[in-house]
Amino acid sequence: MLFPLDWAAEPLTAALTLASRARALIVDLRDNRGGDPDTVAFVCSYLLDERTHLNTMYWRSGDRTEQSWSLPHVPGARFGGSKPLYVLSSDRTFSAADELAYDLQQLGRAVVVGESTRGGAHPCRGWTVHPHLEATVPTGRAVNPVSGTNWEGAGVRPDVPCPAAKSLGHAHELALARLAD
């Protein structure tokens, strides 16, 4: 999970600062079911060199938008925006994890390796209409500033398709080949 920042900022800072010295990085989102969009922006901030527009949420209520940007400053050290970065995905990757993979892919920052994700880009709200029936309705939609669309329903399509169980090996081979250049 990409837990809310008040829980996750400290351990993410420690992990991403530790990873900042690596020559290449593989981020495993294969079993990540989602979480907080602010945490997506926080993680992206360590993987980019400068403040970058990541996503815009359109909300039906009030016909308004909210932009999501990477942070201009992060605690600890950045991995940065030029070293090889690979994101592992599966059909279990969902919601905010979809967004992390999609944002980095659309920016040309990461190579997504694995399976298409589940495709949850629209926040929803549920209403009980009967004791045994709930209606779930999207209340907004993500709009990527690069593609002008999102991953809802279709999922994030990998750049290097392969079974999720083999994606770590493939990404590792890709990283070693790129570092050998």
Image (cartoon, rainbow, N blue to C red):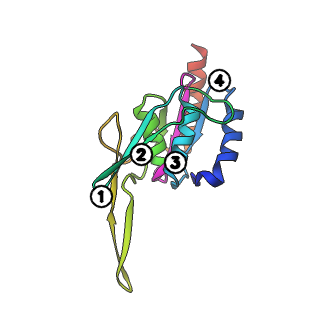
First reached walking from the N terminus: tag 3 or tag 1: 3
First reached walking from the N terminus: tag 1 or tag 4: 4
Residue at which label 4 appears:
23
Residue at which label 2 appears:
116
Q: Are marks 3 and 1 in contact (CB under 8 Å)?
A: no
Q: Is residue 175 left or right of residue 107?
A: right
Question: Badge 2: how crowded within 10 Å, few (<14), some, or many (20+)?
Answer: many
Q: Nearer the viewer, mark 4 or mark 2?
A: 4
Residue 53 inside the magenta-drawn segment: no
SS assignment at label 3: helix
Residue at which label 3 appears:
38
Q: Quadrant of the N terminus?
A: bottom right
First reached walking from the N terminus: tag 4 or tag 3: 4
Circle 1: residue type: Gly
Q: Nearer the viewer, mark 3 or mark 1?
A: 1
Q: Is residue 103 left or right of residue 150?
A: right
Q: What is the span of residues highlighted in magenta in the rendered image? A: 81-96
- Distance between the alpha carbons at the discs numbered 1 and 2: 33 Å
Q: Nearer the viewer, mark 1 or mark 2?
A: 1
| Residue extending furthest toward the top | 181
To which quarter of the image does residue 137 belong?
bottom left
